[in-house]
Amino acid sequence: MQIHTVYTLLAVGIWVIVGTLIAIASRKGLGKGLSEYFIANRKIGGFVSALTYSATTYSAFMMIGLAGFTYKGGVGALGFELTYLAGLMLVIFFGPRFWLVGKKFGYVTPAELLGDRYQNKGVAFVAAVLCLIFLIPYSAVQLMGVAYLMEILSYGGIPFIVGLLLATIIAIVWAWIAGMRSVAWTDSLQALVMIITAITITFFVIYKGFGGFGNFFNKLELNYPQWLTLPGPGFFSFKVYLGLTLPWFFFSISNPQVSQRLFIPKSMGALKRMCGGFLIFGFVYTVITVLWGFSAKLLCPNLSIADKASPTLLSLSFIPTTLALIAMVAIMAAAISTIDSIMLSLSSMFAKDIYQNIRTKASEEKVLWMGKFIIPVIGIIAFLFARARFGLISTLSVASSTGLLMTVPTIIGAFFWKRGTSAGAIASMVVGAIITATLYITKCYPLGHWPGVWGGITSSVVFIGISLLTRPPRKKAEEFINYLDKTLLEKNAL
Amino acid sequence: MSTPTIKKQKKKFSKMRRGYLVWFLILLVLDYTIPYTLLKNMPRIYGSFLFYIIWSFITIISMFTIFIRWRD
């Protein structure tokens, strides 16, 4: 089947126009100020919060990367992704805490929260710089995924560079138009496109390609029995499984584009609906994507590169062109909804935690201007990274969650340990990140364990050790944690 | 709420939090061990595949029992 360039551009064009109209509509009632632009003044309802949380969390990695993991390693991919979903148990404990202190102290970024709690702007600065270092390459890889997909499905009709430029412009525009409002609204559209398309096309392939679930599972057991066990064909050894799941388990509190969303619900009820909605979305999307990966294994068995499983499956002759195009748009939607959220989150951190900490007398208007200015700058840097296709980009991208894992001891300490200090926080983030990046770049895995394991242990030990040797901000710690203890009781949250 | 009631409530919450943490820890240990041991030689759809589905279902329901109680 040949998917014509014109049809590909038409499908993308319709999606871009609808998304842009939604982004423009979201400007209605947009107020002034940092809180309004970056976290929608904490006034997002539960349903939209759930959809933007889902669309931001699930990127193009799902239909490309997770399908590839399933193709290559079998059922371990399901375990890996469901363990990641189970990481929401952290939000069950941290979500109300983030939301309550965000509202009480007026925090806009997660790094700002850390800086205030430890009474040291250096903590916010280091956390923001870490996020910039690890998340820009991650965004670049997402952009590359979109560009490759368009190139493959248009049979070269849309060159890589054109797809890359298109994806970058869409992400910048949708993030810039109304900040969190336009991102949340367009995310909602994209989350619905992602889940409905994934369900439709997977069911279509299973019924059209295999005659139903019974035959599908029988063929799987008959042809690839090893793919239904662990370590399976060998990819998911226990050490790999642990190394992959550990950083991703903490994703919900370590990645700012996700943890910043804990500030946006308009009430505890909305936060509750956000968690419930995301759990249902995540469970369905994960199971469907793994079934999609297994379908690719059965229908396109001899691919040398597992990540090509999805595009190859979409190119099979029995899949109608229209359905393949919609699936392509859904994968693009997954990528763009993650990239624009990262851009917005990073720009807020640059403005609040880097620029405002250097220019302490800058007005709120000036800081907001800087935040808006930096959105396209981040987009252009990600574009240039993606265009250069450095080998280091994929290393840093894979390392992104592991690198951000180094902020976890500091975050846990902020909410639960009055003895934590800014020196401990800064040292643990810096030492952990250096160890992680070094192990990834040199491909050195001591005792066979992945860098996340070593980085996590080191940053925890450093945080506790240095905190015990230095003086904590007692007054702020008491105010912060005692306020939470009192208010959590009122909200009936654990 | 009077001070003794608050203290009582605090104690209850602290106990519940610990209980849930232990329960989630047990679930995570099962996630990392069962597929690599008991189900290692069961290449069937009702092996690790079904285990992960049931395991995540139990985990999700456990989370629901916590946040369903949150109030404005």
Image (cartoon, coloured by chain):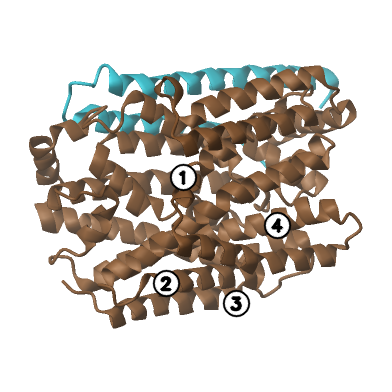
Chain colours: A brown, B cyan
Q: Which residue is mark 2?
A: A161
- Residue type, numbered disc 3: Ile
Q: Chain of mark 3?
A: A
In this picture, is A351 found above or below A411?
below
Q: Chain of mark 2?
A: A
- Residue type, numbered disc 1: Thr
Q: Position of residue A487 (x, y in %)?
A: 76, 34
> How many residues crowd around disc 1 within 10 Å: few (fewer than 14), some, or many (20 or more)?
some
Say whether marks 2 and 1 touch (CB < 8 Å): no
Q: Position of residue A20 (x, y in %)?
A: 53, 76
- What mark, if any, has residue A348 been given in the picture? 4
The span from disc 3 to disc 1 (Cα, nearest Å) is 36 Å
Kindly indicate the quadrant of the structure image that contains residue B2. Answer: top right
The residue lying at 86 percent from left, 23 percent from top is: A471
Q: Is residue A69 left or right of residue A115?
A: left
In this picture, is B43 found above or below A393?
above
- What mark, if any, has residue A395 been given in the picture? 1
Which element is circle 4 on?
helix
Point out the frontmost of discs 3 and 4: 4
Q: Is residue A283 left or right of residue A256?
A: left
Q: Position of residue A66 (x, y in %)?
A: 34, 46
Point out the frontmost of discs 4 and 2: 2
The residue lying at 23 percent from left, 62 percent from top is: A314
Q: Are marks 4 and 2 on the same chain?
A: yes
The residue lying at 81 percent from left, 40 percent from top is: A116
Q: Chain of mark 4?
A: A
Which element is circle 2 on?
helix
- What mark, if any, has residue A24 been given in the picture? 3
Closer to the N terminus: mark 4 or mark 2?
2
